[in-house]
Amino acid sequence: MFKKVINTKGFWKSVCFLAIAFAVVFALIKWAIEGFSMAYFTERNPLMFITTLLLAGFVYGFFVTFGKFRSKLREKESRR
């Protein structure tokens, strides 16, 4: 079932979209919590900051998309 889900058309596109959306929303919320101070961006290593945001977004996007596509496939199979 795992390979079937990740090989479904549109799966990886959805994962990437959700990863980027998560990273942007998460960064904005954290920045707001810090009081919209530019130090939030400048005090960190930019490469590490972006890398960790995108990795966290990828994990989030993968699990959410996997659940969505898996439920669609299960529903499709139960109709047969």
Image: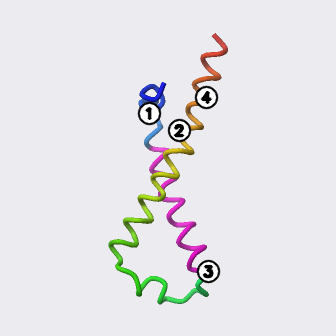
Amino acid type, residue under disc 4 in the picture: Lys
Disc on the earlier residue, 2 or 4? 2
Colour mapping used in the image: rainbow
Specify whether 15 is left or right of 36: left
Q: Is residue 74 left or right of residue 20?
A: right
- Percent across and percent down for residue 15 are 47, 46
Would you identify the image quadrant in which residue 44 lies?
Answer: bottom left
Of pointers 1 and 3, the one earlier in the residue sequence: 1
Residue at 49% x, 45% y is 62
Label 1 vs 4, first from the N-terminus: 1
Assess whether mark 3 and mark 2 are in contact (beta carbons under 8 angstroms): no
* Residue extending farthest left: 47
User: Alpha-carbon neighbours of circle 1 within 10 Å: few (<14), some, or many (≥20)?
Assistant: some
With respect to residue 32, does 51 lie above or below?
A: above
Mark nearer the N terminus (2 vs 1): 1
The rendered magenta stretch, by its main secondary structure, is classed as helix
Check disc 1 and report the residue beneath it.
6
What percent of the width, then of the height, locates residue 69?
56, 33
User: Which residue position holds label 3?
Assistant: 32
Disc 2 to disc 3, C-alpha distance: 30 Å
Question: Within 10 Å of the Cα at label 4, are there few (<14), some (14-19), or many (20+) other Cα atoms?
Answer: few
Q: Are marks 2 and 1 in contact (CB under 8 Å)?
A: yes
Q: Which residue is mark 2?
A: 66
Indicate which disc, 2 or 3, sits on the residue closer to the N terminus.
3
Q: Which residues are magenta?
A: 13-33
Nearest the eye: 45 or 15: 45
Residue at image mark 4: 72
